[in-house]
Image (cartoon, grey):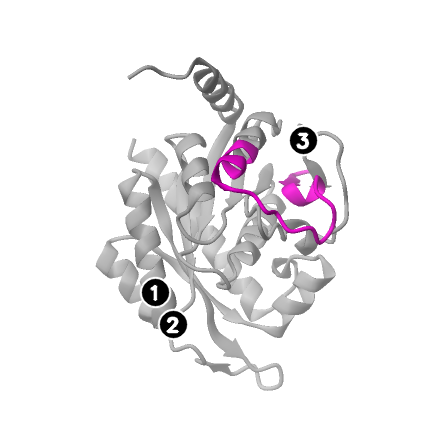
């Protein structure tokens, strides 16, 4: 079977661009509405606060919300090569920087794949420690296109909520990752309990424990749980990641980051 020379050359340019990045982590979910973007943003911001150089690629073409969570909604860039600086250690890139505000992305599969390849090839992250990729929900064209091109050393984190329907879809995401030989770094239980703002008591609205059980069954690491907290909504809407505030949710998120770093170090030592 003959290889398309143009596609082969593009793949080489993508590989060259990705080679400067130490850790590439895609954030996946089996379904929408589980807080995948919130986890992506706070994971990246938390890593940057620890001195790591971090980039976020907002690859959810139909719902590019990463800029909103950094207070950068409405910002437009003229060059795809230059990601937007949030702090000295953190830069982001998103399709929303290049399309009119509130305009729907009405693209068929090949158009979406082309856009993704252009982003992987064109954005110059430089030498950074982490690239966090906020994927769209599910296992469609965008997810497949990115995971097949970002590099064989990339890793995945699954985000889910405790409900049975979310766990079912997360199982599909785990099976998808294994089908394409994507390294699974672990799974996060988001919206795990609700923190009462008055008494600080935790109430399990969506049940609890199902994700940990799923992790055990699938033999992947349980990275931790993050509760529902009013601070998360307020921080996200104001453009400031919730991990920067002191709350139960921020402390749990820091625990997740500790586990992510620990797992990466263990995987490097085992090579």
Q: Residue at x 28, y 44 (%)?
A: 178
Q: Which residue is mark 2?
A: 163
Mark 1, Cα crowd under 10 Å, few <14 / some 14-19 / many 20+, is: many
As helix, strand or loop, the secondary structure at mark 1 comes to helix
The segment highlighted magenta reads: 87-115
Q: Residues within 10 Å of mark 3 (few under 14, many from 20)?
A: some
In the displayed structure, 228 sits above or below 21; it is: below
List the residue tagged with mark 1: 167
Task: Compare residues 171 and 23 and report the one nearer the observer.
Answer: 171
Instruction: Give the answer, above or below, for where 196 lies relative to 110.
Output: below
Rounded to the nearest whole Å, what is the CA distance between mark 1 and mark 2? 6 Å
Number of callouts: 3
**Which x, y percent locates residue 156?**
40, 45
Residue designated by label 3: 80
Locate residue 202 relative to residue 175 in the image: left or right: right
Magenta segment includes 123: no
What residue do we see at 67% from left, 31% from top? 80
In which quadrant of the rendered image does the C terminus lie?
top left
Q: Residue at x 36, y 51 (%)?
A: 186
**Image marks 1 and 2: residues in contact by CB distance under 8 Å:** yes
> Which quadrant would residue 7 be assigned to in this image?
top left
């Amino acid at each position: 079977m003959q290889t398309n020379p143009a596609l082969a050359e593009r793949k080489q340019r993508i590989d060259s661009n990705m080679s400067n990045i130490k850790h590439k982590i895609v954030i996946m979910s089996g379904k929408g509405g589980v807080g995948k973007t919130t986890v992506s943003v706070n994971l990246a911001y938390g890593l940057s606060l620890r001195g790591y150089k971090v980039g976020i690629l907002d690859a959810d073409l139909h719902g590019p919300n990463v800029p909103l969570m950094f207070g950068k909604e409405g910002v437009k860039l003229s060059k795809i090569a230059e990601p937007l600086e949030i702090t000295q250690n953190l830069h982001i890139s998103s399709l929303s920087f290049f399309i009119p505000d509130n305009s729907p992305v009405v693209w068929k599969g090949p158009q979406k794949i082309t856009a993704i390849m252009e982003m992987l090839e064109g954005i110059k992250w430089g030498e950074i420690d982490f690239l966090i990729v906020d994927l769209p929900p599910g296992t469609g064209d965008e997810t497949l296109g990115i995971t097949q091109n970002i590099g064989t050393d990339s890793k995945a984190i699954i985000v889910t909520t405790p409900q049975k329907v979310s766990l079912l879809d997360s199982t599909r995401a785990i099976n998808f990752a294994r089908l394409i030989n994507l390294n699974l770094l672990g799974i996060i239980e988001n919206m795990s309990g609700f923190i009462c703002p008055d008494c600080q008591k935790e109430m399990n609205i969506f049940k609890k424990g199902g994700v940990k059980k799923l992790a055990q069954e699938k033999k992947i690491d349980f990275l931790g749980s993050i509760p529902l907290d009013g601070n998360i909504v307020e921080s996200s809407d104001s453009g400031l990641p919730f991990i920067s505030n002191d709350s139960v949710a921020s402390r749990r998120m820091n625990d997740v980051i500790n586990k992510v770093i620990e797992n990466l170090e263990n995987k490097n030592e085992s090579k």
